[in-house]
Image (spheres, rainbow, N blue to C red):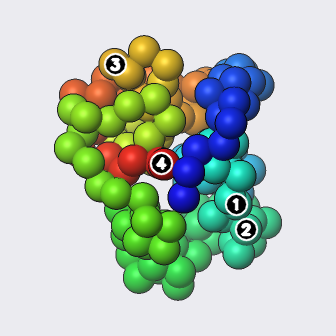
Amino acid sequence: MERLKNWDIRLWAFLERAEGKSFQWGQHDCVLFACNCIKKITGLDVAKPWRGKYKTLRGATGLLRRIAGGGLEEVAEKIAAENNFEEVPVNFARRGDVVLCHSKLGPALCVVGSDGAFAVGPGPDGMERVPIAECSRAWRIS
């Protein structure tokens, strides 16, 4: 899979629109956020099968178990495997790559931001920035 032409402009516009949004299960949570970023970068909607299928933590947890047999890490592994997104060392993650990190809300899937030093994702008061050094895994979205 390749990045679309002008993927960076599409991703930047999406991140700007997401800036003021707070975390919301099934609408603006970390999994859908990461998947929406992947869609802006590649044109592929990897979350299509489960969009609109949950609205609560309990619903999200059950869905993650059904689709990947576990939690966030397993979902990221499944999405990566199904789409040939290579896992890379966290210190090699670049803009647009998906990372697993620990946010204010707990474990989260985030996306590497424009400067490469931080990952961004939905937080309780809008977008949260997490230092890349605090992320544990990364997948190249290419």
Q: How far apart are marks 2 and 1 (CA)?
A: 6 Å
Residue placed most toward the observer, 26 or 45: 45
Element at badge 1?
Answer: loop
Mark 3 is on which residue type? Ala
Q: How far apart are marks 1 and 3 (CA)?
A: 26 Å
Q: Is residue 18 something that shows in the picture?
A: no
Element at badge 2?
Answer: helix
Specify which label sits upstream in the sequence, 2 or 4. 2
Q: Distance between the residues labelled 2 and 4?
A: 17 Å
User: What numbered label is drawn on residue 81?
Assistant: none
> Which residue matches tag 2?
48
32 with respect to 88 (left or right)? right
Q: Do the residues labelled 1 and 4 touch (CB within 8 Å)?
A: no
Which residue is at 31% across, 23% downward? 131
Q: How far apart are marks 2 and 3 (CA)?
A: 30 Å
Q: Distance between the residues labelled 4 and 3?
A: 17 Å
Mark 2 is on which residue type? Lys
Element at badge 3?
Answer: loop
Instruction: Kindly give the residue lying farthest to the top in the view shown.
Output: 115
Residue placed most toward the observer, 119 or 12: 12
Specify which label sits upstream in the sequence, 1 or 4. 1
Q: Do the residues labelled 2 and 1 touch (CB within 8 Å)?
A: yes
133 with respect to 103 (left or right)? left
Q: Are marks 2 and 4 in contact (CB under 8 Å)?
A: no
> Which residue matches tag 3?
117
Packing grade of label 2 (10 A; few <14, some 14-19, many >=20) is few
Q: Which of the 4 quarters of the picture holds residue 98?
A: top left
Q: How far apart are marks 1 and 4 (CA)?
A: 13 Å
> Which residue matches tag 1?
45
Q: Where is residue 9 in the image (x, y as percent from the top left)?
A: 69, 24
